[in-house]
Amino acid sequence: MRIVRFKTKNVNPQYGWVYQDKVGQIQGDPFGDFRRLEPEFKLSDVELLVPCLPSKIIAIGKNFPEHAAEMKSEVPQLPVIFLIAPSALIPSGDPIILPPQSTQVEIEGELVVVIGKQCRWLEASELKSAIFGYTIANDVTARDLQRADNQWARSKSFDTFCPVGPWIETEFEPSDAIITSHINNSLKQMSSTRDMAFDPYQLVLFTSTVMTLNPGDIILTGTPAGVSQIVDGDTVSVHIDGIGSLINPVQAEKRFIKE
């Protein structure tokens, strides 16, 4: 099932579900008890929002060996966790804004795990009930600032630097799905989830030993090799087989100063 957050001119932001080319409202909490209402809106007529509202965005570094190599680094012995500010979130379709502080902003297409219930110190037998579903992210990074800071918070937390969407797929199988990223019509990244150093289940288990995970929290599972610079006027598309496509235009930041 595909779960969305959406709004229309007459409907406030809320959760819904996708059936073919229509969207139905969800009554209740999709992370708890809920009921699906009849699909009544054309998918093309609604505005899709970020598909969940995480209390935290957890991300994993250097989880694809080829990406670690292109960053001139080794694959870590344990998953490397970092956090991204939730204010960086935008949905598919919204523009990625290039900040004036950086001259090298790059894309990182990633599979995202969506947590379904509050959990800590998960056991392997609890994983399926803890994972609500999967979606797509673009972990946009100001690479020059990442190098300058020698840590990742600023370079990855600018407003608009974490596009996520277009929906959550609750029936996705993460063991061997192809991830591709394009800038305009040019292929930049292509790999399979099977190439991860730590698979999504291992990442959820490991992260739960560090912090409490809440319903709607998301874990970005790492990016393949091929991270590439974006500039004003580009369009970025991240596609994962079995989920769909996350598409965002790129714009330079425009600041208007009254004289």
Image: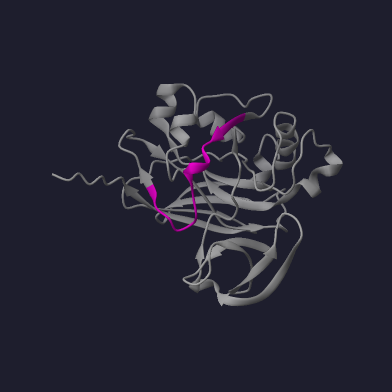
Where's residue 231, x and y in %? 33, 45
Residue for point 43% across, 46% down: 160
Residue for point 40% across, 28% down: 145
The residue lying toward the viewer, choosing from 254 and 1, is: 254
Where's residue 35, x and y in %? 74, 67
- Residue 132's place in the image compared with 148, above or below, is below
Quadrant for residue 249, please give it: bottom left
Where's residue 237, x and y in %? 47, 54
The residue lying toward the viewer, choosing from 208 and 221, is: 208
The residue lying toward the viewer, choosing from 141 and 40, is: 40
- Residue 94 counted in the magenta span: yes
Q: Can residue 209 be seen in this view?
A: yes
Q: How is the image coloured?
A: one colour
Q: How many marks?
A: 0
- Give the side of residue 167 with respect to residue 162, left or right: right
- Residue 68's place in the image compared with 166, above or below, is above
The residue lying furthest to the left in this view is: 259
The residue lying furthest to the right in this view is: 125
- Give the side of residue 42 with respect to residue 154, left or right: right
Q: Can residue 139 be seen in this view?
A: no
Numbered range of the magenta stretch = 81-96
- Residue 120's place in the image compared with 184, above or below, is above
Q: Quadrant of the C terminus?
A: top left
Q: In which quarter of the image is the N terminus?
A: bottom right
Where's residue 97, x and y in %? 37, 46
- Residue 18 counted in the magenta span: no
Residue for point 84% across, 37% down: 123
The residue lying toward the viewer, choosing from 71 and 7, is: 7
